[in-house]
Image (cartoon, rainbow, N blue to C red):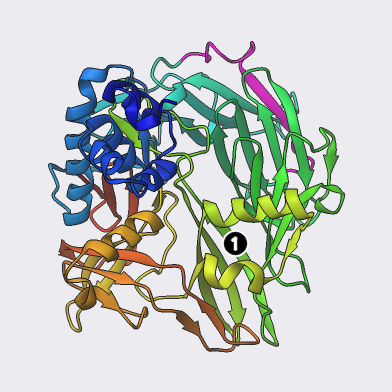
């Protein structure tokens, strides 16, 4: 009988290379020979390091000559994030206009002349070069835009015409090339989607999300005679996948390639989150009561005379995200994502912002229970205390920036100082595997553990938060405890505090938005 250890080393490596990283780590514990083989083989070490850092192979991984260099580049990339060793810093004057987006390493800013300017942010370690271009000469006026640089996709929403000789109450959603300013070649002609606006409302706000072949738009109307609407299309075929008309939906984000996570606020009922399978929903307009809700996640019970007033959800990249270039050595894994859920609550004439940080694994584990046990409603105690981290209105997280999350990192502004307020950028990282590994290996861990998570780092520092966050106030009926560990790092900025200052997070750095000087400060590794 031939044992596996009797096989040639080359065959053993080929076998182990087919094993998923989590199982590969278990294989290290079987015997000393397998341990030595795994720890001295570049391709296996690269797989483990990718897994631990929340990354996955880039499209060009088929070249085996790159294995050794990729491992070194990955370690340098993670070390640069850990120590904030920036390789590129640049300040860009902010053009006129108030809309901006940061998606897939591309920063976009709307110009007042019905145009958009774009900057591709550089990355030293992933060999991405900086680039700038404009989209101009549009023959229609748009009120909102979104994009997916990985698919060269630009989405522009054109308002309905409620006045003039020809009235048309239909939104026209244009699907165009991000770089060539023409109808997108993968969209079914004429590369325009449509959606009816039932009542004229120029105060409607829009949220645009793209995940692979699917485009979702939330039309959040303010008109009392109209309802908000969440629509999902297959943007390549033009087919509608789901239409839900319900004001209870306040925010949404793609959870997986077929699931959407929505934040729900019902009058007189506590706030909740729900997962929808948009591939199974009716293609006709319907309400949340008529929808097939796969899972519902309840918040803690609110206190008396406490009312939710608004909500938002942030997560990036999308589940089906692919990098723009085939030459990147690695990218953020689709399974390594954080959802920052914001809930604004009015209590005693004061509005608090409740930030709830939830990793994808918390939601997917509940999806697994739904499939195996049929459980579809999760009370707070069943999912929140150990699977999330809740923070109540920390004064160094005053605003929500539209692009404050990437992967498992959440970026926010912190202020410190007495007379002369200063600014720091906090990066909260919820990569659980990396945290466990660092806590196990770091010799100086005890000095970096924060027993009180209600902290101010203030200076350039790093710490691990492993103790519970305990919320005792009038917002919730009972005391709320959450314990999901995270690592926080902070670096200071060379400027005084500006109330309108915000920060955006990308795969390779951050962008500080300074509305006081109207500048973008681009900082990348």
- Residue 367 image offset from top left, x and y in percent: 67, 51
Question: Height in image: 293 above or below 455?
Answer: above
Magenta-drawn stretch contains 491 = no
- Residue 319 image offset from top left, x and y in percent: 52, 37
**Most foreground residue, 13 or 298:** 13
Say whether residue 74 is left or right of residue 281. Answer: left
Residue 425 seen anywhere in this rendered image of the structure: no
Question: Height in image: 340 above or below 325?
Answer: below
The residue lying at 27 percent from left, 76 percent from top is 449
**Most foreground residue, 287 or 472:** 472
Residue 306 location, quadrant: bottom right
The residue lying at 28 percent from left, 43 percent from top is 35
What is the tally of numbered marks visible in this picture? Answer: 1
Mark 1: few/some/many CA within 10 Å (<14, 14-19, 20+): many
Magenta-drawn stretch contains 185 = yes
Residue 522 location, quadrant: top left
Q: Secondary structure at mark 1?
A: strand
Residue 49 location, quadrant: top left
Residue where numbered disc 1 is placed: 311
Question: Height in image: 352 above or below 214?
Answer: below
- Residue 406 image offset from top left, x and y in percent: 39, 47
The residue lying at 55 percent from left, 34 percent from top is 210
| Magenta-colored segment: predominant secondary structure | loop
User: From which residue to which does the magenta span run?
Assistant: 182-200
The residue lying at 70 percent from left, 27 percent from top is 194
Residue 111 seen anywhere in this rendered image of the structure: yes
**Most foreground residue, 157 or 112:** 157
The N terminus lies in quadrant: top left
């Amino acid at each position: 009988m031939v044992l596996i250890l009797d096989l040639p080393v080359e065959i053993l490596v080929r076998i182990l290379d087919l094993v998923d990283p989590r199982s590969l780590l278990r294989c290290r514990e079987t015997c000393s020979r397998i341990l030595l083989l795994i720890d001295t083989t570049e391709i296996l070490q690269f797989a483990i390091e990718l897994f631990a850092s929340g990354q996955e192979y880039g499209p060009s991984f088929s070249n085996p000559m790159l294995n050794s260099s990729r491992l070194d580049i990955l370690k340098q990339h993670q070390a640069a994030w850990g120590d904030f060793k920036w390789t590129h810093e640049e300040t860009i004057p902010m053009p006129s206009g108030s809309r901006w987006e940061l998606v897939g390493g591309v920063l976009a800013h709307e110009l007042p002349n019905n145009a958009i300017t774009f900057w591709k942010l550089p990355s030293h370690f992933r060999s991405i070069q900086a680039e700038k271009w404009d989209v101009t000469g549009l023959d229609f006026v748009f009120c909102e835009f979104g994009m997916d640089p990985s698919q060269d996709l630009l989405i522009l929403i054109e308002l309905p015409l409620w006045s003039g000789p020809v009235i048309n109450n239909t939104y026209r959603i244009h699907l165009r090339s991000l770089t060539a300013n023409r109808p997108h070649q993968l969209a079914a002609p004429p590369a325009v989607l449509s959606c009816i606006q039932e009542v004229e409302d120029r105060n409607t706000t829009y949220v645009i999300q793209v995940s692979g072949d699917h485009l979702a738009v939330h039309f959040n109307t303010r008109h009392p005679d109209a309802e908000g609407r969440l629509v999902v299309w297959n943007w390549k075929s033009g087919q509608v996948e789901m239409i839900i008309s319900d004001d209870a939906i306040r925010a949404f984000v793609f959870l997986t390639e077929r699931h959407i996570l929505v934040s729900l606020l019902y009058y007189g009922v506590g706030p909740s989150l729900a997962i929808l399978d948009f591939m199974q929903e009716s293609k006709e307009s319907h309400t949340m009561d008529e929808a097939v809700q796969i899972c519902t996640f309840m918040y803690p019970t609110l206190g008396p005379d406490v009312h939710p007033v608004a909500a938002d959800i942030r997560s990036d990249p999308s589940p089906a995200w692919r990098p723009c270039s085939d030459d990147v050595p690695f990218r953020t894994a689709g399974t390594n994502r954080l959802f920052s859920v914001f809930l604004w609550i009015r209590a005693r004439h004061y509005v608090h912002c409740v930030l709830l940080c939830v990793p994808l694994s918390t939601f997917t584990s509940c999806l697994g229970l739904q499939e195996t046990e049929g459980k579809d409603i999760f009370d707070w105690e069943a999912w929140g205390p150990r699977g999330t981290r809740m923070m109540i209105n920390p004064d160094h997280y005053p605003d929500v920036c539209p692009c404050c999350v990437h992967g498992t990192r959440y970026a926010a502004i912190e202020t410190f100082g007495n007379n002369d307020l200063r600014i720091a950028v906090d990066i909260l990282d919820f990569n659980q595997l990396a945290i466990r590994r660092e806590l196990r290996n770091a010799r100086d861990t005890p000095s970096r553990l924060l027993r009180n998570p209600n902290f101010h780092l203030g200076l350039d520092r790093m710490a691990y938060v492993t103790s519970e966050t305990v919320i005792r106030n009038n917002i919730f009926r009972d005391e709320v405890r959450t314990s999901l560990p995270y690592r926080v790092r902070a670096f200071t900025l060379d400027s005084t505090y500006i109330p309108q200052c915000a920060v955006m997070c990308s795969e390779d750095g951050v962008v500080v938005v300074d509305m006081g000087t109207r500048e973008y400060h681009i900082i990348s590794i």
